[in-house]
Image (cartoon, grey):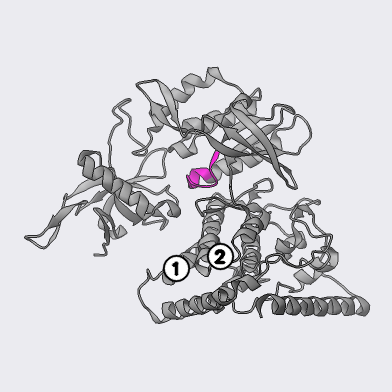
């Protein structure tokens, strides 16, 4: 039996659950737990006293990052004050998907509507009725957007999945903070804040309170909401798989232009490059792996929703004050394997070689982009930042050009990074595999894994790299290279290359010289940064 306990919460092996059944309209499950939850330590018998056989709920829609000691401690504190209100017994894995699942007390019926609970935190049926009763009180003035919001409200299983129409009058202090290839990003102050739960005594929604939010508008022809809804639906689809995916709150409208806005969490630390600028001296290897793990979790969520991002680069990786990193900007997201348009866009150094040849987008193309982001976490420089982003660069990337590995990078990290940007799609890891590998590394580095030969080797590699980083951290100057004028994080139409590529001797010579000059430049930059 494999148990570890945190207060009275515990890790429970999935094999201890039987009679597992799906809950209707939910991804959660009920199960029979033969031993039951821990009650307390019996000193006389020198063992744990247990509840004995009981029905429990397995809630798998929690993000791994939410399953923290703080979360378990808060549940333990509740159980000490009032044991009858204890809702969480521990953590396990779904026996089919291997996702983490929280073991919750099974509330058979909602005391307010007498319908089965979907979660101990939210009664879908009861709250759905309340949302429906309020439909007549608001409108976005667009039928499709109204329908989208209403469906999201009535299908929500957690408060984090609730979307709402946010009147523009509820948002103040609008400030533009960025321009992308497909829209404008602003921030604003939302005094009421997001929905938390219903106060049935006061008959009103309890809310989070004042908060800053990010607002994204789509640069499409006036009156068109198709592109806007495409992005909003992609985000909501992921939110259904992971309630902590990006924090999507609802939809609003710009007061002056009447453009619709996606309202989501505001990320205080900005994108990857801004984060590196601010944290280059203190950005340890533990921090880097932790951030990459968060990105991999988001990518896994996206792929589980049968979507590919298509525009993953350092400008679309955002960081919050809670040290969590998120993937953002789903303007190009599409179904896995979708054929390309003639005017496909992207940021060239992050685009997979097969995409440059106009082959269909796949999950593997996103993994390639992830590999380039891994390199940026080690180099603190723009990939191919000193050379022109044109057709020549596209051809050489297709021919095998990759950013040069930075000195003193752990070998296991280098191998994983190279697997991500392998020319053969079948050799690239999946997002699920990336998340698992990075999680394991994090546990090894933090000393939370059993001591094994392979684990010790990985620990040694990261420990040595960290020691070298700490010797001269101030020597690393983030994004110190002089960028070529063509370099930008704004998605643009990609150069078109077609296979088979036939080059004359003169053209082949030019490409070889191009590669040679590039590698010489990288060597000089590495010496200046790391020596």
Q: In the rendered structure, find residue 345 and report the number of the disc placed on it.
A: none
Q: Is residue 450 above or below residue 347?
A: below
141 relative to 54 in the view: left or right: right
Q: Which residue is mark 2?
A: 283
Q: Report the predominant secondary structure element of the magenta stretch.
A: loop
**Can you give x and y, in whole percent of width and height, for residue 199 in the image?**
38, 26
Q: Are marks 1 and 2 in contact (CB under 8 Å)?
A: no
Q: Residue at x 54, y 74 (%)?
A: 470
| Residue 370: x %, y % from top left | 62, 62
- Above or below for 263 versus 91: above
Q: Which residue is mark 1?
A: 440
Front-lying residue, 64 or 446: 446
Q: Position of residue 173 (x, y in %)?
A: 64, 33
Name which residue lies at 63% across and 66% down. Answer: 371
Q: Is residue 9 magenta?
A: no
172 displayed left or right of 224: left
Magenta part of the protein: which range? 239-248
């Amino acid at each position: 039996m494999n148990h570890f306990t945190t207060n009275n919460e515990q890790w429970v092996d999935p094999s201890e659950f039987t009679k597992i059944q799906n809950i209707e309209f939910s991804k959660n499950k009920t199960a029979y737990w033969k031993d039951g939850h821990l009650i307390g330590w019996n000193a006389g018998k020198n063992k744990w006293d247990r509840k004995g056989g009981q029905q429990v709920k397995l809630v798998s829609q929690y993000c791994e990052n939410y399953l923290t000691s703080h979360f378990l401690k808060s549940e333990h504190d509740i159980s000490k004050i009032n044991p009858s209100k204890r809702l969480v017994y521990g953590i396990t894995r779904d026996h089919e998907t291997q996702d983490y699942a929280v073991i919750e007390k099974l509330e058979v019926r909602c005391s307010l509507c007498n319908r089965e609970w979907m979660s101990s935190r939210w009664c879908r049926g009861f709250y759905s009725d309340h949302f429906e009763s309020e439909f007549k009180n608001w409108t976005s003035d667009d039928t499709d957007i109204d329908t989208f919001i209403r469906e999201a409200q009535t299908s929500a299983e957690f408060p984090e999945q609730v979307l709402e129409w946010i009147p523009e009058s509820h948002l103040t202090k609008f400030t533009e903070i960025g321009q992308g290839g497909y829209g404008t990003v602003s921030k604003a102050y939302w005094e009421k804040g997001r929905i938390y739960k219903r106060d049935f005594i006061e008959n009103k929604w309890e809310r989070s309170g004042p908060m800053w939010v990010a607002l994204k508008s789509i640069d499409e022809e006036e009156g068109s909401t198709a592109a806007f809804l495409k992005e909003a639906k992609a985000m909501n689809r992921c939110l259904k798989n992971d309630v902590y995916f990006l924090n999507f709150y609802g939809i609003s409208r710009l007061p002056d232009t009447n453009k619709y806005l996606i309202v989501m969490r505001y990320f205080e630390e900005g994108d990857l490059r801004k984060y590196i600028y601010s944290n280059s001296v203190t950005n340890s290897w533990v921090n880097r792996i932790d951030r990459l793990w968060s990105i991999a979790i988001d990518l896994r969520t996206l792929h589980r929703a049968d979507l590919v991002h298509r525009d993953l680069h350092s400008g679309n990786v955002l960081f919050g004050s809670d040290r969590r990193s998120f993937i953002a900007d789903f303007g190009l997201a599409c179904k896995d394997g979708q054929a390309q348009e003639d005017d496909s866009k992207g940021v060239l150094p992050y685009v997979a070689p097969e995409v440059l040849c106009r082959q269909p987008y796949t999950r593997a193309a996103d993994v390639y982009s992830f590999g380039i982001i891994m390199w940026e976490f080690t180099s603190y420089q723009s990939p191919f930042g000193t050379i022109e982003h044109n057709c020549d660069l596209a051809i050489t990337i297709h021919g095998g050009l990759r950013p040069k590995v930075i000195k003193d990078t752990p070998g296991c990290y280098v191998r994983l990074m190279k697997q991500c940007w392998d020319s053969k799609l079948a050799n690239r890891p999946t997002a699920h595999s990336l998340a698992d590998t990075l999680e394991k590394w994090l546990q090894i580095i933090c000393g939370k894994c059993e001591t094994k030969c392979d684990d010790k080797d990985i620990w040694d590699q990261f420990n040595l790299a960290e020691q070298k980083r700490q010797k001269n951290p101030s020597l690393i100057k983030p994004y110190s290279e002089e960028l070529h004028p063509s370099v930008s994080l704004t998605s643009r139409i990609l150069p078109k290359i077609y296979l088979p590529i036939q080059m004359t001797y003169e053209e082949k010579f030019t490409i070889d010289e191009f590669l040679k000059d590039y590698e010489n430049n990288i060597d000089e930059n590495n010496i200046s940064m790391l020596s």
